[in-house]
Amino acid sequence: MPRFAVLATMAVAGLAACGSASQAGNASVASLPSISATARSASLDPSSQGTSDIPTNIASGRPQLRVDTTAAEQARIYGTWYSCLQSHGVVMETTHGQLKPKGTTPASAFTACASSQPLEPPALNPDTNPDYNADLAKDINCINRQSPAKVDPVPGGWTFASSTDPFYSTAAFQQILFSCQIVGFGPG
């Protein structure tokens, strides 16, 4: 299983402000973070709208995640995108307790919502981070020092050393992933 860049439990916090087809730019859905199914109802709460404090990528106008973006921030950012997709007819599904888009149709929904699709942190992309391999090694070493459940390096990321260790699904493991991602890929 490839590296998880997104923390496990995510809650939805806002309704979408969907973009136009001209903003589609780099809409890709190869890997979609997900939100907890129990948090889905929060996306329908109009009082939770508002994303003005979310960092935006100047070139694309899309929300820009940082290495230190918290689970709550990610939930709000992805919740906006997922709500937009859903309002444009994308069917959502729950897999392993996480809500996410089921497929990539209708394509028009992904085009309409492209401006709200978050961009992953540039530091987590080997194409934009010249120190990616060294940063990844620091991340893996940190995880294996702090966690009783170990991970193994694979090209471009890491995988679980054991497919059955229950610690992988705990909040404590998610906190280790978050803190080690900052250690490995953060500034400094």
Image (tube, rainbow, N blue to C red):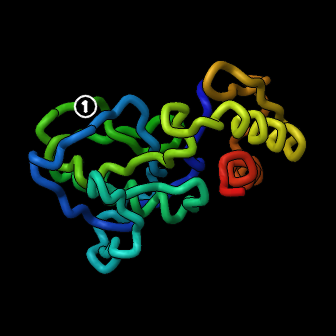
Q: Is residue 130 left or right of residue 83?
A: right
- Residue 188: give x, y in percent of width and height: 72, 57
Give neighbour class at mark 1: few <14, some 14-19, many 20+ (Cα, 10 Å). Answer: some
The one nearer the camera, 54 or 50, is 54
Above or below: residue 4 compared with residue 16: above
Image point (49%, 32%), residue name: 127
The one nearer the camera, 79 or 131, is 131
- Residue 102: give x, y in percent of width and height: 31, 33
- Residue 180: give x, y in percent of width and height: 74, 49
Image point (27%, 65%), residue name: 15
Q: Residue furthest bottom?
A: 47
Task: Locate the N terminus and report the quarter of the image it occupies.
Answer: top right
Image point (10%, 52%), residue name: 20
Q: Quadrant of residue 16?
A: bottom left
Above or below: residue 111 compared with residue 102: below
Q: Quadrant of residue 108?
A: top left
Q: Residue furthest top?
A: 155
Name the residue that disc number 1 marks.
Answer: 104
Secondary-structure class at tag 1:
loop
Image point (33%, 67%), residue name: 14
Badge 1 amino acid: Thr
Above or below: residue 159 compared with residue 13: above
Q: Is residue 111 left or right of residue 177?
A: left
- Residue 78: give x, y in percent of width and height: 39, 54
